[in-house]
Amino acid sequence: MNKSTHCLYHNQFADFISEDEQSILGVLYGSYHGTSQSTQTGAWESEIIIMKEVLSSLKEEKGQIIFEYNIPRIGKRIDVVLLLKGCIFCIEFKVGKETISEGDVDQVLDYALDLMNFHKFSENRLIVPVLIATEYQKSSTTIQKSVYDDNVLKPLITGKNGVQGLIQKVIEQYPELPPIDENWIISPYAPTPTIIEAARNLYESHSVEDITRHEADKVSTDATISCILDVINRSKSNGEKSICFVTGVPGAGKTLVGLEVAVRQTYQGHDNPVDNESAIYLSGNGPLVAVLTEALARDNYNKCKERKENKKLKDSRREVGKFINMIHRYRDNMLAKIKNPIENNVIEIDPEKAVKVSEAGYSEVEHVAIFDEAQRSWTNKHLAKYLNRGGTYGNKLKISDFPMSEAEFLIWSLDQREDWATIICLVGGGQEINTGEAGISEWINALNNNFPNWKVYISPKLTEPEYAEGRIDKLLSKNKNVTYSDALHLSVNLRSFRAEKLSTFVHMLLSFDKQAKNVYREFRNKYPIVLTRNMDTARKWLRDRAMGTERTGILVTKEAARVKPLAVHVLPSDVENAVYWFLENRTDTRSSNYLEDAATEIQVQGLELDYACLLWDADMRYENGEWHYYRFNGKTKWNEQNGDSESMRERRKYMLNAYRVLLTRARKGLIICVPEGNANKTVGGFWEDSTRIPEYYDGTYAYLKSLGLEEI
């Protein structure tokens, strides 16, 4: 009995007990997609044996056992869940451990709280977190509610021999509970009013402005927000589906507008959330989500601490999760609801995998989804390849021959609502930086081909060259549902020299526009861009300018490969490092201000520094009036990316866009360091370092200098 894609295995108690252990292990193994397979398999073997023993006296009960349950859209997986006599037992195993830690206890309590806050069929139900350190020799003796004053019990702690007794005690203490919904395992994601209210309080601190500072004036941002809310209200009144495309140069405040719309739509001027009117802010940018979440959570935690309130940082992080989510979790939660295999290239909901919720149909609960950096959604080819191999972690959500791009599937997901829906796409021009990122044309093609009734509201700026190579007008020429609105472009006022002028200059620099020098001359006295060949000089320039809490940092592209000789370490790609890099203060060696770790375009897109150094490696070089692109082979040489295949052309576009992103990350000033390379030769006349020959860098430096950038 394992049809669900929400877990790796589930069954009725009696069937689980009678099933062969190796058969159960085979189901777990076949559904899992992870790295440490041998370690995980050993843990599962122990868990199966223990749970068979625990449930042996309960085999006549109508209960369910679930292994590796995915909490909808939260990105966490519970080792074992038992649904028994109206109780939800949430079990975390620590196989082989004979001691427990505070972190272990917090982990199982977190799972229980996430179920309470985000899982519709767990709302107002008794949730029992149980920590099993298999070799632990003690067992909890009291059963009581947790400090959260809700239906979650204080975590119960035991070894493998005490589990059965604890479960029996809970059942005896709570004998008259109503039964659990039989569709519990496919419960929709549904934040409770409590978590929404907490998230609102978090956002009202507006600490997010400190890391998404923007240069659009309030009149501009308010006009954009008002326009979006008008579209939402029109869609609601007319029972329509609609989509808005919002543009804005780097620094114009797209992220902040997205978060503001999410809050305003959810509250609509009231003190409490409006029922069934909520919005969600989604991004595929892991570092951005992590940094925004952590910044808001830390701010809330510190304010509570000042008020002497007893609150943990992890609670604040959980509350932020109401409004800010990873787009991939949203997508994967919908994928778990469809019929698999797909027949005749038509995606359909599988009613055995999903619960229909009133007017929401089989969609997610929000009427409004805000997709930040929508240009980064995946192509059909990239998404199909990803799903064909079963993803990269967690459940093996394997789907062959997936027929849609990510943009098309996201529209389809909102289209499942039976009343109305609005999508807001926040778009950065020329900022597709990863293989498989489709650009905004994929959204337009999906609307034209498969969603002809959707109303399309669009910024006129979307027709400019950096958006879908200037093809938007042509793509929309036959779509009769298009409305253009200037308010959907986040403009900046005349005093905000940086956002508009810098973006224009960078575009000209990268496209060899002869007017680039004149454009830079217009703002160079207010926003310096300087050149150097020496990283020590670059570090001194940054340190001399940063005052107080202003943030500095070194930036490199992900293709940069020979920066180690310059005493620069490229920041590892995981989001935790990005959080430290952006948020820790200058006394912490992990901070960007230490000027040791360099972040890439992947980690900084959507975020900014006050002053930055762009370390320009030999991956993109100015040669004979053109950009030439190279990838290092990891050993001895750079290979030019000069093929004419579609994948090679895309790779060159992404490499160019990486520099576009990095050149626009600084709010107040930028220093570009183009190294001199290594001009030394051996006794035999060979290059001492053939991977850093001066000619790899000299052309780029000369070109940048020709634009009027000051040398230091």
Image: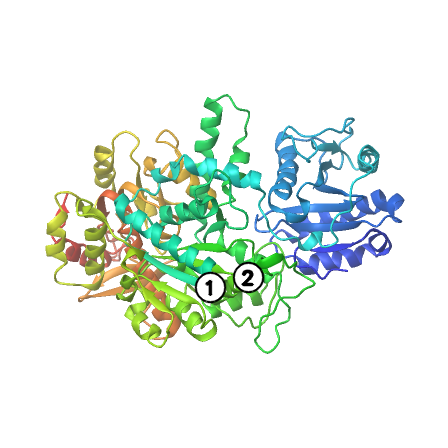
Q: Which residue is mark 1?
A: 241
Question: What residue do we see at 78% from left, 26% from top?
Answer: 141
- Quarter of the image with the C terminus in it: top left
Amino acid residing under circle 2: Arg
In this view, 343 is above or below 91:
below
Q: Tell me if 143 is positioned left or right of 247 in this view.
A: right
Query: In the rendering, at what x and y percent does residue 102 appear?
Result: 63, 30
Q: Residue at x 41, y 46 (%)?
A: 259
* Quadrant of the image containing the N terminus: bottom right
- CB atoms at circles 2 and 1 under 8 Å apart? yes
Q: On the image, numbered disc 2 is attached to which residue?
A: 417
Figure check: 171 above or below 514? above
Position of residue 343 relative to residue 504, above or below, is below
Task: From the top left corner, tell me how far across and down residue 87 is, in percent.
Answer: 76, 41
Label 2: how many Cα within 10 Å (few below 14, some 14–19, many 20+): many
Give residue 340's position: percent from left, percent from top.
Answer: 64, 69
Q: Please, what secondary structure does the residue beneath circle 2 have?
A: loop
Residue 135: % across, % down? 76, 34
